[in-house]
Image (cartoon, coloured by chain):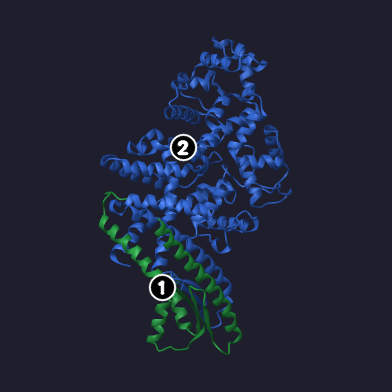
Amino acid sequence: MAENINEGKEKLKNGFQRFMAKIGDVIEDAASLEVTTFTGDFTFKTRQIVRSGVDKFEINNVLKGMAIENQTNIKLIAYTIINIDADVSTIVKSDLSESDTELLKLHTEMMQSSREARKATINMVTNLIKG
Amino acid sequence: MTDDTGYIIERLTRELTTLPTQKNRCIQHLTELGYIPVIRVNTLIPKEVALAKAAFLKDVKRSGLYPEITPGQLIPDDDDLLADMLGQAVDIDEGFIFGRLPEKGELNLITRIIHYRLDLFGMWEFPVSNPFNAVTLAGLKEIAGYADCSPLEAVNLMGDVEKFTQKLLKANKEEKFILTFKPANTVDEPLIRKLDRRHKFKRQLIEDFGERNDFFKYLNREVLKNDPSKIDMVFLHKEALNPFKRFILRLIQIHQWQEGLYDGLLDSDIGEVTLSSIINAVHLYNVTDRKNIQLYRVLTYVYDGYFLFNALFFLQEYMTEDQQTEYAADAEGKILSDITKAMKNAGPQSLNAFHLNLEILKDEITIASTQKPEEKKGFLKRVYFGIKRFFRKVVRFSKKIFHWIVQLSRSFMGILKKIFGHFFNNLAKGIKAFIDGIKFLFGKKSTVTVKEDKVISSVIRIDGDSTSFVSQNATELMHEHLQKIRYHTTSMIFSLSIVGGVLNIVMKAISVISWPMILFSIIRIYRNISESYKRIEFITT
């Protein structure tokens, strides 16, 4: 705990207000959720990931890296959009191979987890509003 | 993150480094359960600890005792979770209840817990890691005889010391609780003089029990005599060896240990340390309950190193009343709430003293947490980590805790350390969960499963959008990855609840925001939410 009880008071205040604002931003995006599953050959990146430690791995970095290196062999396996009114649309890659079909299981699980994540977010916001 | 949000995360991360560690608690419990031999404790090497943790986790998976924990959580490096699971195994407040005894020759976590309990009560002289055998059963039958129950009930009663005490009091006559003991080492003369109250002890005994049976008659007429040379020493010697009475002395040592009043060895020897803890207990309850119970009500020195102890009064007065406490159901919540209220109402001087002394308290607790468990004379020096019963007891002091810290009252330091040791542990877990939740909020968490050149990676953002990448031929990693995703999702829900709860409290008091207030909010919210998650933390690393 702080030596001085008032240390960084303004920063704390602004920081917490910023957290609240961030939640506000998020809730705007929660009206629909998108689940996307890709496959592709990015073994080079995998090696890089292992070297640099998996915790630091971020998909965006991989995507950026691929774009820079003009590596385009990424295939979309499935894309699902679930609206808050429960409308669901899914696009699935045609001519799925046997291993691609396996990936649909991952996609389905991710849909479930995404729903739970959105529900958790909505619950958090509801509780914040209710006080 | 902006500078200000980053500042909060950076400061919380810094706070984490100052909080107590769970590593040594794991070592103590692993030793208590026989995964580490007691004789190895003083010279342990990390590999032995790692092997012990792995053996415990293997037993956990087979035991069925932790249904709420998913296999994905069982990571030997997670000392917080390991400490909690080990803590549940060695809990004697609300310990595990078993439906059957193991078969002879069976060695599993349940056998170890039974041997641990017997060991604690001084009824087991062999390695805790021995299989369930005839000696186990003999020990259980002896305790069952004391408590008038079956061996299985005895096992379960030992996991709830307060209930066990009540059962023992009910099953045995009053005179069985008038104990005689002779400390192994000589007690200092001033302490003997302070406790030599034969006459008053006798008068009190007559007042309480009269001469209603031969035991009390004999005690009054042949033992509690003014002239020491006429005291029946053979009687005292025989009484001091009585197995049931020795067992009750051990029970009292356990009670004192549970309450943070005794930190010596659990060895059934009522020496100076135990005597002082009994004196402290009487003093503490006198102060807090505004009573004036004199020491002779409880004990007296008799002669030639022998003491008499009225354990009936001691157990009834101090050790079996927890359930009746008004706030017993949520004692911890009541204590937290009273401290928070006192903080809000305190003047600037008291508040500053509180914060300063809390730092001192934290340092002492953190330093103690880095001290490794020790073996002494073949016994393990144990710290009691259980808190449920303890909180039910200390809730009666709830309104005084803030002032004890302001005054940094050394007389209550043992109790304060126990209370805040627990709070700081919760704070550490709460901070981790809060940071975790903030990372979710800012989309910084990903789940990655890697094997050789294969990788599956998924990100679930807080608005629910998710993206997964699966490298070629990585489907073999799917099962493991999906397990991680399920755990990750649960941890996200848990962490977001913590973030929401903390924001809720902090935003209501944003104009008077202070760092201690934030930390106490985290402790309170973490506690409330983890209770609703059956005390299991979901924190991703």
Q: Nearer the viewer, residue B123 or B292?
A: B292
Secondary structure under tag 1 reads helix
Query: Which amino acid lies under the numbered mark 2 shown in the image of this protein?
Result: Val
Marking on residue A29: 1
Q: In this picture, is B263 found above or below B63? A: above
Quarter of the image for residue B48 reads bottom right
Q: Residue at x 47, y 68 (%)?
A: A118
The residues bearing labels 2 and 1 have C-alpha atoms spaced at a distance of 48 Å
Circle 1 packing at 10 Å, graded few (<14), some (14-19), many (20+), is some
> Element under label 2?
helix
Residue B334 makes an appearance in the image: yes
Chain rendered green: A
Q: Quadrant of the N terminus of chain B?
A: bottom left
Say which chain is blue: B
Callout in the foreground (2, 1): 1
Report the disc number at residue B394: 2
What amino acid type is highlighted by mark number 1? Asp
Q: Is residue A45 left or right of residue B254?
A: left
